Image (cartoon, rainbow, N blue to C red):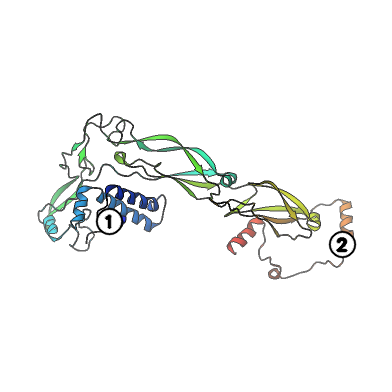
Amino acid sequence: MARDYYGLLGVSKGASDSELKRAYRKLARELHPDVNPDEEAQARFKEISAAYEVLSDPEKRRIVDLGGDPLENGSGNGGFAGGFGGLGDVFEAFFGGGGAARGPVGRVRPGSDSLLRMRLDLTECATGVTKQVTVDTAVLCDRCHGKGTNGDSKPIACDTCGGLGEVSSVQRSLLGQVMTSRPCPTCRGIGEVIPDPCHHCGGDGRVRARRQISVKIPAGVGDGMRVRLAAQGEVGPGGGPAGDLYVEVHEQPHDIFVRDGDDLHCTVEVPMVDAALGTTVTVDAILDGPVEITIPAGIQPGSVTTLRGHGMPHLRSGVRGDLHAHIEVVVPTKLEPADTDLLRQLKENRSRDVAEVRSAHAAGHTNGGGIFSRLRETFTGR
């Protein structure tokens, strides 16, 4: 049974060339291996590429409209039906007939998408940034403008395949004469050759060039996010429409803050006395500059103080995350004699405070570690 090429692209049977191209470009952006590494998406990408190749070629599209399948060659079908467009074609292929011609492929084809990785620090991710990047891609040949020919010369039909884009060979076997077809080695399946190619691009219609592109990264982007620049990717063979350029953000670690979505986390080390009496600590927030964090008297190690709305901006909105300060109480390891006397006096005054052994589960300390260990527990539940 012939494949439904129109259905693969999601267009009607009477779709125009421009409608076919738009449908293919839309699906290719979603399914291209550089964008979607999923195996099922890659298989779908091959299917829609084959469908576009067929329907963009007038002769192949005519075969489809007549109920045939120009890409079927009889291999791997488990039977005769559909392999050569019908039982009559099978007998022709095995016993001396010509077989169903696939026809030449188009010389002008869509270009591939490109991927560029950009390193950004946390501040650049928070504020957004516009950067000039260097891109090395195929661009339209500025001499032949995609035609591939030199001056006013034109392509001619390939002498090897007679313009069919494929060559056939016949071999004798136990079944009789077996005919096989393959793309023409001279024209590479196009069906025509350029006797006087463009001296700049060699007939390809495109050349590789290094160029500068301005990339605008919006505020709130995160690690792994991609920004799409339409039609800034590879120009296709024969000067075909360019693919898209995707810029993937790689966020660099920050010296103070750990990011979790739109929230920021930091560790604040508080001396033992300040933890007991209370104090204020100034931290340089990413977007707000110096902000004060109030440490209440008697705060316990592992406590978290939250500043609402001082985190990262949400992508393309005015909403902001929070800044979470994880409190570490610092106990001095060396004391001056006068400090020791003061602490002894405090101990005598608070004789009711004694060391006590408690269950780790009851105390809520099943795991040790600093900020990163606690963040792991908070975010992963382990």
Q: Nearer the viewer, mark 1 or mark 2?
A: 1
Q: Which residue is mark 1?
A: 12
Residue 158 lies, with reference to residue 68, above or below; the image says above
- Rendered location of residue 259, percent (x, y): 60, 52
Q: Using residue 223 as the reference point, say whether residue 30 is left or right of it.
A: left
- Rendered location of residue 352, percent (x, y): 85, 68
- Rendered location of residue 323, percent (x, y): 65, 54
- Rendered location of residue 281, percent (x, y): 74, 50
Task: Tell me the quadrant of the picture where the C terminus can be found.
Answer: bottom right
Q: Residues within 10 Å of mark 1 (few under 14, many from 20)?
A: few
Residue drawn at (31%, 39%) of the image: 239
In three-dimensional space, the C-alpha distance between marks 1 and 2, rounded to whole angstroms, equals: 86 Å
Residue 20 lies, with reference to residue 147, above or below; the image says below
Give the image quarter of residue 40. Answer: bottom left
Give the image quarter of residue 360. Answer: bottom right
Q: Earlier in the sequence, mark 1 or mark 2?
A: 1
Q: Using residue 35 as the reference point, say whether residue 329 is left or right of it.
A: right
The front one of 189 and 308 is 308
The front one of 90 and 285 is 285
Residue 224 lies, with reference to residue 130, above or below; the image says below
Q: Secondary structure at mark 1?
A: loop
Query: Please, what is the three-letter code of the amino acid marked with disc 1?
Result: Ser
Q: Secondary structure at mark 2?
A: helix
The front one of 31 and 37 is 31
Tell me, for residue 347, which label it has, or none. Answer: 2
Residue drawn at (36%, 45%) of the image: 112
Task: Tell me the quadrant of the picture where the N terminus can be found.
Answer: bottom left
Residue 10 lies, with reference to residue 215, above or below; the image says below
Query: Please, what is the three-letter code of the amino acid marked with disc 2?
Result: Lys
